[in-house]
Image (spheres, grey):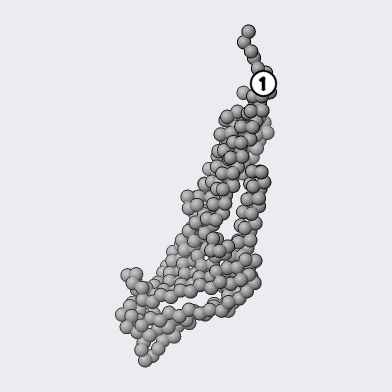
Amino acid sequence: MKVNAKATAKAAVILIFFTVIPLFGQHLIPSEFFNAFSTQGFDILGLLNKIALIGLAVAVLVLLKGNVGKTSDRYLALSIAWKLLWLFIVFFAVGLGHPETLGLAVISSKAGGVENSVTFDFRLFAGLATAIVALMIIRSIVEFQKTESAVTAKEPNVKPD
Amino acid sequence: MLRYCIIGLVALTVALFALSLYTLFAGLSGAIQGDAFGLDLNTDESTGDWLFTFDANPRNGGVLAVRLFIQLEIMSLDGESLAKNSTSVYIDAGGQQQFSLTLLIPGEDVQRYLLEGQEGIFEMKFGISTLGDLVGFTQTMRIRGGAPT
C-alpha cells in the first residue's frame, strides 16, 4: 500500500499540536492555574484532555482520508465521518467543552456562601451547524454518485466472445 | 445549487455568531458599567417591612437589539420563597432604557426568617439575550447571609 506522505505529515502536525502538546504541556502548567479556574467551575484539565482526544481523532481521519482513493466507498464513509467530527467540534466549542449540552453550557461555582451559575445559550448555532453538516453530507453523496457513474461510463465494456 | 446553499448558510452562521457575540458583550458591559445598576434596602420602621429597590439604566452598545431579564428573590434557608419579582426590558441597538424593580418582604417574614441570627438566601438572576431570544446567557447568583446591620 502506497502511503500518502502529505497526509502523513498533516496528521503528524495535528497530532503534535492538538494531542501531544495539550497532554504533555499540562504538566508544565502550575497547579494553582488549574485551581483558579476550577473554583470558577471551569475544568481546564478535562478540557485539555478532550482537545487531545479530538486531535487524535482528526489526525487519524486525515491519515486515512489521504490514503484512500476518491472513488472508493471508504472515501465517502471517511468524508461523512470527517463532517460529523467537525459537527462534534462545533458542539464542543459552543458547549464550552461539553458537547453533550448541544450548545446550552452551564458553568457553576460555589465559594463560601455564594453560589454562581452562568448558562450560555448557543443552541441556535448548534442547530445551524447541524443543518450545514447535513447539507454537506448530502452534497458528498451526490458528488460521489456522479464521480462513480462517470468512472463506470469511462470503463471499456468487455463483451464475452 | 447545493454548494451555494452551504456557502450561504456558513456565511450566515458566521455573521450571526459574530454579531450576536459582539452584541452580548457590548450589552453586558453597558449594563454593568458604573452607575447603571443600584440596589437599595429600606426598612419601614412602623411595619417592619423590608423594601428592596433595584434601579437600572442600562445602555445597549451592540449592533442588535437585546432583552435584559432581572429576577430578585428572597428565600428562607429551607427554600421557601418570601418575596419574588422579575422584569424584562427590550433595548434597541444603541439605545438606553430605565427601569426599576421592587421587592417587599412583609415584616412578619422578616421577624420569622431573617432576624435574630437567622439566615436567608438572596437570589439574583440576570439574563441578556439577542436575536429574538435565540442567543444569550443567564447568570444566577445566590448569596446566603444574615440581616444587614
Q: Which amino acid type is shown beneath numbered disc 1?
A: Glu
Q: Which chain does the numbered disc 1 sit on? A: A
Which is nearer the eye, A151 or B103?
A151
- Quarter of image, res B14: bottom right
> Residue lying furthest bottom in this view?
B46
Above or below residue B55? Residue A153 is above
- Quarter of the figure that contains the C terminus of chain A: top right
**Quadrant holding the N terminus of chain A:** top right
Label 1 sits on a secondary structure element that is: loop
Name the residue rendered at 62%, 58% in the picture: B16
Looking at the image, residue B120 sits to the left or right of residue B35; the answer is left
Front-most of A36 and A151? A151
Residue A124 visible in the snapshot: yes
Can see residue A44? Answer: no
**Total of numbered circles in the picture?**
1
Q: Could you classify mark 1 by the number of other residues whose Cα lies within 10 Å: few (under 14), some (14-19), or many (20 or more)?
A: few
Measured as percent of width and height from the top left, residue A26 is found at 55, 49
Give the percent coordinates (x, y) of residue B132: 56, 64
Q: Give the residue drawn at x 31%, y 80%.
A: B112
Q: Residue at x 47, y 63 (%)?
A: A117
Looking at the picture, how far across and down is residue A58, in whole percent? 58, 40
The foreground one among B97 and A25 is B97
Q: Which residue is mark 1?
A: A155
Q: Determine whether B53 is above or below A120 in the image.
A: below
Name which residue lies at 41% across and 86% down: B43
* B5 relative to B85 in the view: left or right: right
Q: Position of residue A75 (x, y in %)?
A: 60, 32
Against A135, is B131 above or below? below
